[in-house]
Image (cartoon, rainbow, N blue to C red):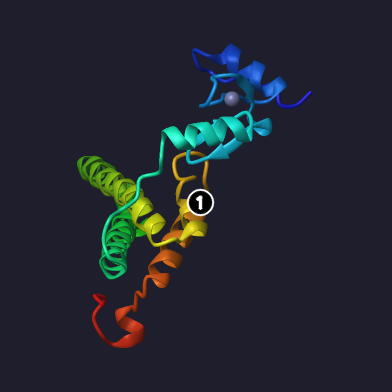
Amino acid sequence: MENLEQPLTPDGEIASHSRMFGRKVECDGCNAKLKAKDAIYHRGSYFCNPTCLATWEKANPPRMAQGSPDELKHNLIHTITSALDEHQLGQGSVLEDFATRMIPLVGEANADLDAQVRSEHTTRFVEYTHECIPIARALGYHDEVRVLETFGFGGDLRNVIQALQSARDKAGFVSASSAGLTNEP
Ligand SMILES: [Zn+2]
């Protein structure tokens, strides 16, 4: 037997069931229930077989940004830069958190405000990241798109950040520090 600790959730029964038999997911093609490990994962959905996936893909063509390659690259660099900026702002600083804890009475209101501001930055990071996907797809950056599509579906944040940076590099991003110039192409 593995871990016997039970989750304190209303669906604790389902959680302990799935712990014993593998997490169940639903095929987005035919709604059949199957184990996550037996399912095909694609664009944020699970499928029981390639036929279900192909049928679904035909009915749900991926969003694709419109524009010339130069326009798309310009948009992508701009959107990714915005996403990464928001991500950074959403992180907060360890020093700030430390200072807040040291003066609890004065710091409490500030801490609430900081948490709210950080969560707003994180929300915008998520929005910008999702905005990047149709642009990167239109440019044919399939490896990056595959990673970005895992965002919010169990994908590792570090991989998502890496994919954003990689897509931005492919689009011809030149950092101000390495070129001594502006970010805009
Ligand atoms: Zn199916």
From the viewer's perspective, is residue 76 above or below residue 120?
A: below
From the viewer's perspective, is residue 24 above or below residue 155?
A: above
Task: Determine the residue positioned at 52% across, 49% down.
Answer: 156
Q: Which residue is mark 1?
A: 146
Task: Determine the residue positioned at 35% across, 59% down.
Answer: 95
Left or right placement of residue 22 versus residue 83 in this view: right
From the viewer's perspective, is residue 98 above or below residue 16?
A: below
Assign the C terminus to one quadrant of the image: bottom left
Mark 1 close to ligand 1, CB under 8 Å: no
Q: Position of residue 124 (x, y in %)?
A: 27, 48
Q: Residue flagged by tag 1: what amino acid is it?
A: Arg
Assign the N terminus to one quadrant of the image: top right
Task: Determine the residue positioned at 41% across, 35% down.
Answer: 60
Q: Position of residue 93 (x, y in %)?
A: 34, 57
Q: How many marks?
A: 1
Q: Position of residue 30 (x, y in %)?
A: 55, 21
Ligand 1 shows up in which quadrant of the image? top right
Q: Residue furthest right?
A: 1
Query: Hey, which quadrant is residue 181 in on the image?
Result: bottom left
Q: Position of residue 24 (x, y in %)?
A: 61, 23
User: Badge 1: few (under 14), some or many (20 or more) residues near its Cα, within 10 Å?
Assistant: some
Tell me the element at label 1.
helix
In-front residue for pair 60/78 = 60
Task: Determine the residue positioned at 66% across, 16% down.
Answer: 17
